[in-house]
Each structure stands twice: as structure tokens, then as C-alpha cells.
Amino acid sequence: MRLGALTYLVRDYDEAIAWFTGRLGFVLTADTDLGAGKRWVTVTPPDSGNGGGGMALLLAQAVGAQAEMIGRQGGGRVFLFLHSADFAADHAAMRAKGVVFLEEPRTEAYGTVAVFEDLYGNKWDLIEHAR
């Protein structure tokens, strides 16, 4: 078994697709109309093997009280971890595309890391693990 997808709450499907594909270079792997305004939308990091082998974010447009959780899915902590094989290049590319980093890169025992915010304020780690 493996995890296939994680539900990620969004305000608007198209807004989220544009941010993930434009700023992080994710690949839109599914966008299926389910009727009644609902869609099955998945995005994956560029190196995750969009043939089904990698973890996907299932973009779910929030309804009702769910909207209160947009940007707060991690309870204020780092929520998601984006692994990098070349931290310096990925960090520079993300900054150039307008991704907001909350700190300068730092070296930890486990690797090089920096926290960034997504379009809704959820915190992520960009991390290159130590070898």
C-alpha cells in the first residue's frame, strides 16, 4: 500500500491550479467535472511520476464551514514537505516565481530546509535531505 493523495482545501479550483502549476511547477494530473460545481482535480510535484507512482494533492473546493480551514490545515505548523534534489536551484526558481519564504535557508542535521507559504498561508518545508 501507499498514500495516493491528500485532500487540500482551496477557495477556487482554477486559482489553485494556476498557483501550483505556475509557482511550484506541479503537473495538473486530473481535472474531471463531477457536476454540481464539483471537480476531481489533482496536482503532483514534477518529479513524482505522474503515471500514478507519486503522491498527489487532491484540490477540494471548500464548501460551507470548510472554508474556515483554508490556509489553516496544519494548525499553524508546517503542513507539507516538498523534497528537493537541488535545494539551491529550486529555492531560487521558487523565489523568482514569487513564492514567499518565511526564513532564509538553514542547515539542520537532516538537511537544508526553508519554510515557505502557499497561496493560502499554509506552511511548507522545502527540504533537501542530507546524504
Image (cartoon, helix red, strand yellow):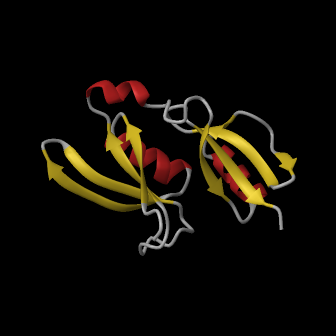
Horizontal arrangement in the rendering, residue 126 relative to residue 11 (left or right)? right
Which quadrant of the rendered structure holds the N terminus? bottom left
Residue 83: where, in percent of width, then height? 66, 58
Residue at 74 percent of width and 44 percent of height: 114
Which quadrant of the rendered structure holds the C terminus? bottom right
Residue 95: where, in percent of width, then height? 68, 44
Q: Which quadrant would residue 61 be assigned to in this image?
A: top left
Residue at 12 percent of width and 42 percent of height: 36
Horizontal arrangement in the rendering, residue 22 relative to residue 36 (left or right)? right
Q: Residue furthest front?
A: 1
Residue 17: where, in percent of width, then height? 40, 48
Residue at 69 percent of width and 56 percent of height: 90
- Asked if residue 49 is positioned above or below residue 23 in the image, the reply reads below
Considering depth in this image, is 110 or 50 the residue closer to the camera? 110
Q: Residue furthest left?
A: 36
Considering depth in this image, is 65 or 90 the residue closer to the camera? 65
Horizontal arrangement in the rendering, residue 106 relative to residue 16 (left or right)? right
- Asked if residue 54 is positioned above or below residue 96 in the image, the reply reads below
Considering depth in this image, is 73 or 31 the residue closer to the camera? 73
Task: Give the number of marks.
Answer: 0
Residue 22: where, in percent of width, then height? 50, 50
Residue at 47 percent of width and 45 percent of height: 19
